[in-house]
């Protein structure tokens, strides 16, 4: 049996840290405080009791393992979402926005070319259509058809056919009619009517 405060403290310390028998260690620390209040071991016992209480309080407050796993999963999902958003912004800036700008330019050129055609400024319209051909994908027939229309109205059948031939040489699978069907020979001019005498 322990008689001195040092022996009591050593027993309590062993019970607390080696044997993990906290309730029994608390009894020994309380005994030191009651029986030997002026000893150095009394101060140590108070410190150890406060440590035990602090650890108990921390264990009660600490999140349960399940909550910790859920918090970790939530955090990882947030990181994944942020990464996906960042990738989306990057892809939009690299690919979608420049393509949208090109689409606006193509629309602007087509509108300007049509207005020049309506005003009878065919040379200016053809220059705009050449720019539109450079900006458009090779599968867009619009600038070629508009240019062919200008040439057809100007009586330049060969140049109108050349527009279609150029387009269909780049897109052979899209041709449904022959170039001659698309741009037929113009009707010969009608002979002047004879006046009756």
Image: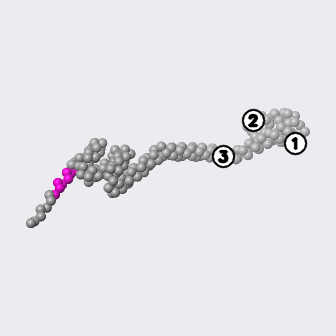
Tell me which residue sits at (70%, 47%) in the image: 61
Q: Whole-percent x and y of residue 69?
A: 60, 44
Residue that carries the numbered disc 1 in the rendered image? 34
Residue that carries the numbered disc 3 in the rendered image? 63
Which comes sooner in the sequence, label 3 or label 2? 2
In the image, which is nearer the foreground, mark 3 or mark 2? 3
Tell me which residue sits at (85%, 36%) in the image: 41
Q: Secondary structure beneath disc 1?
A: helix
Report if residue 96 lies within the magenta region.
Answer: no
- Graded by Cα atoms within 10 Å as few (under 14), some (14 to 19) or many (20 or more), the crowding at tag 1 reads few
- Graded by Cα atoms within 10 Å as few (under 14), some (14 to 19) or many (20 or more), the crowding at tag 2 reads few
Observer-nearest of 96 and 62: 96
Observer-nearest of 170 and 187: 187
Q: Please indicate, yes or no, whether residue 177 appears anywhere in the rendered image.
A: no
| Quadrant hosting residue 168 | top left
Q: Whole-percent x and y of residue 119?
A: 34, 57
Distance, label 2 to label 1, CA atoms, is 22 Å
Tell me which residue sits at (48%, 43%) in the image: 94
Question: Which segment is the magenta one?
Answer: 183-190
Residue that carries the numbered disc 2 in the rendered image? 17
């Amino acid at each position: 049996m322990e008689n001195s405060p040092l022996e009591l403290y050593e027993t309590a310390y062993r019970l607390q840290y080696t044997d993990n028998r906290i309730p029994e260690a608390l009894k020994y620390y309380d005994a030191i405080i009651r029986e030997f209040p002026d000893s150095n071991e009394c101060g140590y016992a108070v410190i150890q009791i406060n440590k035990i209480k602090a650890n108990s309080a921390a264990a009660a407050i600490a999140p349960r393992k399940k909550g910790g796993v859920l918090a970790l999963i939530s955090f990882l999902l947030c990181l994944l979402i942020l990464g996906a958003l960042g990738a989306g912004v990057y892809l939009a800036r690299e690919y979608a926005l420049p393509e949208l700008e090109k689409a606006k330019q193509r629309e602007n050129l087509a509108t300007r070319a049509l207005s020049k055609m309506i005003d009878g400024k065919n040379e200016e319209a053809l220059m705009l259509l050449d720019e539109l051909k450079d900006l458009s994908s090779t599968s867009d027939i619009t600038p070629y058809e508009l240019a062919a229309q200008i040439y057809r109205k100007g009586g330049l059948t060969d140049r109108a056919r050349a527009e279609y031939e150029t387009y269909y040489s780049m897109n052979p699978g899209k041709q449904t009619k022959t170039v001659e069907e698309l741009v037929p020979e113009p009707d010969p001019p009608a002979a002047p009517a004879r006046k009756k005498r």
